[in-house]
Amino acid sequence: MQVCSESSPRPILSTTGVFLAAAILALGWTLATDHVWEDYWITFRSSKNLATGHGLLHQHGERLHTFTSPLGVLLPALCSLLTGNQSDLAALWLFRLMGVAAFGGAAALFAASTSAMKMHRSVPVVLMLWLMTDNKSLDFAANGMETSILLLFTGWMIWALFACRSAKAWAHLGSAWAGLMWTRPDSFITIAAMSAAVLLFTKPDEGGMTRKAWFQLFLKAGGLCTLLYLPWFAWAWWYYGSPVPHTVTAKAGLAGSKSLLGGLWSFLRQPVIMLTESGAGESALTPSNFRFGGWPDFVRPACIFVAGIAYLVWLVPGVRWQARAASLTYAVFLAYLDYYPAYPASWYLPAPVWLGLLGLAGLVERALNFSQGLRRAAWIFSALLLLLGLWMTFHSARTFAVQQQRVEIENRKQIGLWLKEHAEPGDTVFMECLGYIGYYSGLRTHDWPGLSSPQVVKAAKANGYQWAATLAEIKPSWVVLRPQEIVLHLGGDLSIPGCRYRLAQVFDATGRIEKLDLYGKGLLSFDSCFLVFHLEKEVAP
């Protein structure tokens, strides 16, 4: 890959070499862990229905937008078609290979951008090592989520902004923006934040353009982005009755009402949130679902320290303008994740983290222009961050390999298969973890908070988001609960007004999991035990 300009500088890194290294790392992680994220099976149920001619639906005959990413559902459908709809495993591996290639492409685009920016020759190497060994980036590169595709289009956006100066730069940027929207519709946050940051920090004498030139480029790119994304937007509106995914609608009740002013306040107090709360700043560099526990005490402060510095880079004068723009975009997205969604899900984080690490690389580069002591400190910091990242990545891989086998294959998948065998036609099932259980049972699902069920959304809202009252209204045939959910949401027993449930089966891997010597075991323990209840009969009022 070459920069658009005819006067391209000699690349500091071989983009082909970076692509291959990143792809090999992602493929190696996948082979070592075999990890398939729970949410993949939520989406793939719609993908499989589309591929087999039943429409882009979670439940046959019900037009409900139960996924967030258009590409995240369409590409697995294509993979299923390419395998003749005969093998879910083969379709998964085709999608995984797409993710591996996208991860490699994202890394190559970032490498090409750092070369075009003429960063200090060692800094791009450090940056690429940070990016390619980030634990969440590697895991979500090929675990069934759309994250690596989002990274690819983020890399294309960075390349179009910072490396391409041809007459076609607007076309590259507009296409990258459209790709971001096709991957995650909330990408307009990233697009708007990055555009504003570029306008704020641009320096025409340091590889930038005038604000007028940028504004004109953004207008043309925005027009192309709109043109390319409009077909999906219009089709989804026609097909589902709304362009807003039902997943957003279902989670909105848990998140509560939001305002632009509240989002601004979240941005301003982000450093405080990082230090005092379990938010996006804490989760940015830590392993997936770090908040479940089981990691050494030093991990949280170390990761918050690095995430906090990356958040503040945009305020540091003298750092190259591209790095400051990336840092500000990262900061805005962290504030968005801490305020608007119900919680900062792990798969949201790799793309903003890559921007934050680009900002951090700019800070390291700036430090190299000062005294020998500061240069030494910058290199020590860079090396320690890489070592911390490698350590977390190694132990995350161990944990997810066990989690996939003990929790997903031996527990949640088996629950779905058991329900498929024991359920009657027309039965329904309620649970929080919709993916494996919903897909392998094949039953009509009433999940919490209603990603696949408008009935749950309506009942939960009417009953103040109380589980017992919601269950009493929808009366599912089967209920699958973790023991802690019974205690937390149902007062310790399954006393549902108007219903009588009996314990039908227990799926418990707690004993096997507690014997394991792993970091991050809290996530496995959280999903180690499930109780399956069956509705015997409705009780007369």
Image (cartoon, rainbow, N blue to C red):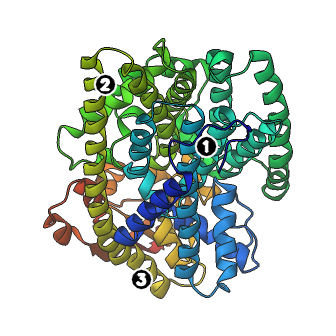
Q: Amino acid at mark 3?
A: Trp
Q: Mark 3 against mark 2, which lies toward the viewer?
A: 2
Q: Is residue 209 above or below residue 360?
A: above
Q: Residue at x 29, y 72 (%)?
A: 406
Give the vertical position of 432 relative to 214 (above or below). below
- The residue lying toward the viewer, choosing from 434 and 360, is 360
Instruction: Classify mark 1: residues with Cα within 10 Å, few (<14), some (14-19) or many (20+).
Output: many
Q: CA distance from mark 3 to mark 2?
A: 44 Å
Whole-percent x and y of residue 192? Answer: 68, 29
Relative to 368, 244 lies left or right: right
Between discs 1 and 3, the one toward the N terminus = 1
Crowding at mark 3 (Cα within 10 Å: few <14, some 14-19, many 20+): some
Q: Secondary structure at mark 2?
A: helix
Q: Are marks 1 and 3 in contact (CB under 8 Å)?
A: no
Q: Residue at x 67, y 46 (%)?
A: 180
Q: Which residue is mark 1?
A: 154
Q: Is residue 388 above or below residue 120?
A: below
Between disc 1 and disc 3, the foreground one is: 1
In this rendering, position of residue 340 left or right of residue 187: left
* Nearer-the-camera pick, 51 or 444: 51
Task: Specify which label sits upstream in the sequence, 3 or 2.
Answer: 2
Q: Callout 2: few (<14), some (14-19), or many (20+) C-alpha neighbours within 10 Å?
A: some
Q: Which residue is mark 2?
A: 275
Percent coordinates x, y for residue 431 in the rendering: 45, 63
Q: Quadrant of residue 99?
A: bottom right
Q: Earlier in the sequence, mark 2 or mark 1?
A: 1
